[in-house]
Image: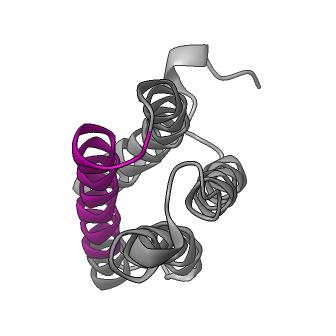
Amino acid sequence: MSVIVNNRSENVLAVFLKACDLFTFTVNTVHNEKYFKKRTFASLGKPIVDLAQAIMAEVHFADETDNETEAGSARRLELMDDIAARISALQANVKVNALKFHLTADKAREWTIVIEDFKKAFNNWRKTEKTRLLR
């Protein structure tokens, strides 16, 4: 049986793969001295990499969390709230580094596109989970 396109939930594997893409892009950008100088890596770069890695890990953990019970679904949504907060923090870090440090506007735009691509998939998954919990 086919599912109407607008009613399809986001494939969790696709969300995880987009989180991996975000992590990879973040690591490659932060380790490029054109955008993050060695002297500021510990204070500016490492926390950003840590955020992206935490997002990736929490997506995996949320997916592994049982959603067959009400308590499990509620726990999964709590994890998703944490992921959403980390996404927001990552976006803020990109903005600050573009405005105040060495991140170019072009690279910040490119990074924002990667974040938004992940965020869209993540929000679709989150919406599906909230709907499931309310049933």
Magenta region, main secondary structure? helix
Who's the residue at 25% across and 59% down the image?
89
The answer to whether one can see residue 67 in this image is: no
**75 in relation to 20, above or below:** below
Looking at the image, residue 71 sits to the left or right of residue 13; the answer is left
Looking at the image, residue 135 sits to the left or right of residue 25; the answer is left
The answer to whether one can see residue 55 in this image is: yes
Q: In which quarter of the image is the N terminus?
A: top right
Magenta-span inclusion, residue 52: no
126 or 107: nearer the eye?
107
Q: Where is residue 13 in the image (x, y as percent from the top left)?
A: 71, 55
Highlighted range, magenta: 77-103
Who's the residue at 69% across and 59% down the image?
24
**How many numbered callouts?**
0
134 or 38: nearer the eye?
38
Looking at the image, residue 9 sits to the left or right of residue 120; the answer is right
Who's the residue at 51% across and 38% down the image?
111
**105 in relation to 67, above or below:** above
